[in-house]
Structure formats: C-alpha cells, structure tokens
Amino acid sequence: MKNLKTLAGAVALSALMAGSAAAADMTVGFSQIGSESGWRAAETTLTKQQAEQRGIDLKFADAQQKQENQIKAIRSFIAQGVDAILLAPVVATGWDQVLEEAKDAEIPVVLLDRQVDSSDDLYLTAVGSDLEHEGEVAGDWLVKEVGDKDCNVVELQGTTGSSPAIKRKAGFEKAISGHDNVKIVRSQTGDFTRTKGKEVMESFLKAENGGQDICALYAHNDDMAVGAIQAIKEAGLKPGSDILVVSIDAVPDIFLAMENGEANATVELTPNMAGPAFDALEAYKSDGTEPPKFIQTESKLYTQSDNPKAIYEEKKNQGY
Amino acid sequence: MTLPTTIRRVLPQLVALFVILALNTAIAPGFLDIAFANGRFYGSLIDILNRGAPVALLAVGMTLVIATKGIDLSVGAVMAIAGAVAAALITSDHSLAATILATLGVGIVCGLWNGALVAFLGIQPIIATLILMVAGRGIAQLITEGVILTFNDPGLVFVGTGAVFGIPFPVILWVAIGIAASVLFRTTALGLLVEAIGINRRASSLAGIGTSALLLAVYAASGLCAAVAGIVAAGDIRGADANNAGLWLELDAILAVVVGGNSLMGGRFSIAGSLIGAMIIQSVNTGILLAGFPPEFNLVIKAAIIVVILVVQSPASQTLFAFMKSRPRSEEDAAAPVREPEKEAAR
C-alpha cells in the first residue's frame, strides 16, 4: 500500500518535473534530526529561509531523533526523484546502504553539521563547523584582550567526554599556549547547562579568593556562561569587567548579556549550514564543480562592539 | 544512652556528614569561612545548604512515598513541568501569587496522577511513576516550546536567589517544609498509618486505614515538593530549562533517602535523616568542585564515598558493630575492633 503511494507520488512528480525540466530551480529533500535543541530549531528555520530566498523547493522531513525515520525519508526523496538531498545524520553509522541507493539514483547528498562513518565517495560534501577552531577563536580573543597582563582563566567544560567539550578545550589551550601570562587555573564540567554553570562558578569563586584571583571565564557554551554570570553578580563582582566572559555558540540570550556589558565575546556556531550547502549544490549542478569533501563554516567572533541588541532581535526569531 | 531517640536515630548520618565536612575543610582551606556580603551570608557551607535545596525538597516527598513501600521516579520531570508552568505564566503577565498557586496546583495534579495509578489501578509504583518521568519532560518542552523560557519577575527570582535575614530563601524553604512535614506526620497518627501501609497494605486496609486516600496524599505531597523544587530551580537561573531542570535529580533524591538511613522496603521513615542525607550528597558534590580534580573523576569519587557510607550503614556492618560492642574489652587487642569494619568495606 505504502509502496503504491510512493510510486504514485513519484509518477506524479516526474510528470511535473518533465514539464519544467528547463527551469533552473531545484527540488531538495532535507532530512532533519528533530528539534532537540534551540540550535537545531534555528538550523531548520534558516534552511527553510535559505531555500525560499534561492527559489529552491524544499521538502522537509523531521526524523524525531530516529535513524529509521531518516532512512525512510531519504528513500522517499529518492522515489520522488529530488535533485539533491540534505542530511543531518542523527548517528554516524549505518548509512552505507541508503547512501548507495542515492548514488545509484545519481542524487547528490550533502551532510549538514554532523559526519558519517561511510566512505566519502557516497556523499558530495559535508558542511560543518570545526569545534577545535571555535575554541581557538575564543582563546585568540582572550590573548589579544589581556595583552601582557597576567590572567588566570577558569574554564567551564561541556559534558565530560562529549566531542564539543574535548575539542573546544583543545582549541582554547592551543590558542593560549606560548602566552605564559594566560593560564587555566581551574577547569570543571558544567554539563552545558545554566544550573550547573552557576553552581560550578560559585565554587570557582570560593576556591579562588572570592573571585579576586580570576581574570577571565571561558565557557564551552553560552548557557553555562549565562549561569556563571549570575553567580559572579551574586558574589558582588562585575561580570564583563572584573571577570571577562568568553563563550561559544552565539545563542540569543548571550547577546542580551553583552548588551548589558556582562559578557565580552562569543564565537558563533552558525545554524546556517544550508547556505554553503546550497552554494555547493548550485555550482555542482550548473557546471559539475566538485566541492571539497568538507566545507568549514565560519566561526565568527562577536563582541560588545558588534551591536548585540540588533543581533539579539535578529536571532530571537530564528527559533532558538 | 542519654541522647534522645530522634537524635540517636540519625546519629550515623550526622557522623557521616561531619566526616565529609572535615574532609572538605582539609581539601579546601577557607571551606568553613562565612562572610556577610550583599545582604546575605556567603561561603561554601551556605552554598551546600543552598545548592542542596532541590534535592532536600524532593527528599521530603520521596521519604513519605518510600515509607509506603513506593517510589516516585517522576519528581525530576515534575520539576521541569513546574518550572515551565511558572515561567510561562509569569511571562504572560499573571500575578506572582496566581503563578505560584497554579504551579503548586500542577505539581499536586501530577502527584495525584501517580497516586491514582498506584492506589486505584494497583500498578507497581516504579512503573506508574516511570510513565510521568518519561512523558513529563515532553510536557515541559511543549509548554516552553523547546526554548529556555527566561523571565525577570523579581518575585519568582527571589524564590530561587533571594535571602531573608541573610539566609538564602531556598534554604528557608526546605528547612520549613521539612519541619512542617515532620510535625504533621510525627505529632499525629499520620506517620504511623503511612508506615503501616509500607509494612502491609492489605492488613492496614483490613484494620480500617483508608489506604487509597493516604497513598493519593503521599504522592500528591511528593508532587507538591517537586513543584516547589521546580520553582526554586527556575528562579535560580531566571529561566525554565525543560531539557535539563531536575534531570536525574529523582535518583539523587532516592539516594538522599537511603543515605538518610531509610529502607526502600518502607515501613519506617525519618524526614530528618533524609534531609541530612541530601546535605551529605551536596557536601560531596561541593567538595569535589572545590578540590579541583579533573571532571572525569567527579562521578567515581562520588560513587566511592557513597559506597563507603552505605557499607558502614548496612545491616551486616551494624550487626558487626553490635557484636564487637558486646564482646568484653579485655579479650581483644584495642586496635582490632577498629580494623574490622575496614575489612568489611574492602570486601
């Protein structure tokens, strides 16, 4: 029954496509993981926006965190004969079969945000952020900001063992290595949450002479920084001036904190993965340009001088 | 013994708490310092009392549920729901009183749902409350629409971060609720009736106890405590984080009850013991944070300390202690009785 339906859909669609084969606009299927986090929701919003701006017909499938739903969605995209498929894979393994099917149907697949373990000739390219580079950008900012002054940094790590925590830590350490005046004095996990960020910051403040000995806070995500900022304020210090605050992600709330002078800098993990993906697809479709196998998105640094209020207003409506 | 029974009952817990605080003092100089700044007391000891508030609040309700031979796995999810409801109401311009009353009401309704499944349908408590544990976080996410719902209402923020006479408000809340529950259950026959259900529900029924009503009431009380904890957690970070509020706290609450010397088999309970248990857990957490170990060690250290406490409290060790006490001193080398429990722990 289901097969019959997809078949009927495919026939109808191919008839439709035959009519407008000359048109440059593409039909792209997008298999999204779900909406487990604000960032993920923003990625969906921006992908839809990008598609609309470029006149791309986007077919969206929400997998609700299940790989089997993603595989079903990709098969139905193949049956519908889409021009390309965007895939944000929920897990890294188990994609060979379905990617093979897409390849046989000559439909290019672009991976968004996460990687897969399959051989790289099964997909056109992967668009993503370099987590280690994000940590480096944050570290470089701090090194430049403090200059020659001695600076004791406390670090709020992400969930222990998670790849963002490991790589954002490594990148930051790389950036401050060789600058002996900047050193990490305490590092502890805040589980990427506001509550834990606040609790751990409270203990940092107690352990480092009431916070007098802390010059800067580096948090692996903005949510922990927002929690820590409250802890700093409750300890009677001024976040943003007594203790510098730099974090990663660029979620809307950190821009409010920057507007109030309570946070200093954030590194953006852009939810606009679809923009570069569509660029690569358009180039590939028009003259067959093979994109590199990994397209790194920009890890943009935002500071208080970047008009945080305006960015907040802009980001607020992206579904974070 | 000259000590009153209530103190003697929680003596092992007090000793454990004291030992851990002593360890913390050894690890972190200045651990015992308490200063007065910004209109409130300030120091690591205050942090322990304050940060332990959600688990302490949950432990009060959990103690009563466990006394009936039940368990409430849903309290963490109910915290998330309560935080979400409070944030949603206050941001849609409802008054503080209405927000808090409605949130507490939602907590009670969640508890009544659990209670009804247990009391009327006879579903085993671990399964009955598992339903809300899984579904509750989804409900909270529906309310917040998947984002961290932030608010700035001074009243709601006060519940999480305010202070009265320099004492953080969450501390006042859990102490007050703990005392109120103890008085309610220990100065009346309620405590005895709850324990009777834990020992044998059917026999209690036959003896004329309204077991269904009482079960509903204890689960509702647990839901109410979870709702208060949810408001505290949300007020603390000025936002409702449906994904993370109260995550895994049901397990800490159960642990607090057990470390507090209560049996999961029900039939007897001590709210004071559970509250001390909650403080023991928080002292361990705070101590680990102050010690500055790499975070990979956090859970291992915590587990090791809890194991030691539970082994010392275990019936086997208690029997051993009693046995050594009863033996005449002269027969034994003075050092030997001290080593015995260590051997027990090593096994």
Image: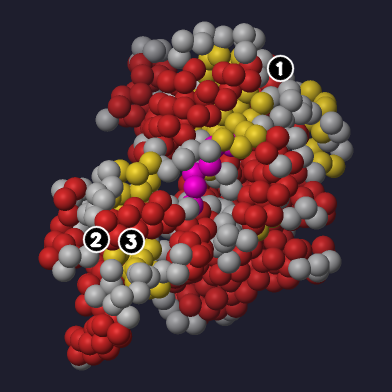
Measured from the top left, where is residue B86 in percent x and y?
70, 63
Query: Do circles 3 and 1 both sit on a common chain?
Result: yes
Q: Judging from the image, what secondary structure is the residue with disc 3 in?
A: strand
Which residue is disc 3 drawn over? Answer: A86
Which residue is disc 1 drawn over? Answer: A212
Mark 3 vs mark 2: in front: 2
Q: Write the start and end of the magenta stretch as one range.
A: A266-271
For the residue marked with disc 3, what is the amino acid?
A: Leu
Disc 2 crowd, CA 10 A, few/some/many (<14, 14-19, 20+) = many
Give above or below for B294 relative to A34.
above
Residue at 22% across / 72% down in the picture?
A78
Decide which of B69, A284 is in the foreground and name it.
Answer: A284
Which residue is disc 2 drawn over? Answer: A108
Q: Judging from the image, what secondary structure is the residue with disc 2 in?
A: loop
For the residue marked with disc 1, what is the amino acid?
A: Gln
Cα separation between marks 3 and 1? 50 Å
Measured from the top left, where is residue B67 in percent x and y?
52, 60
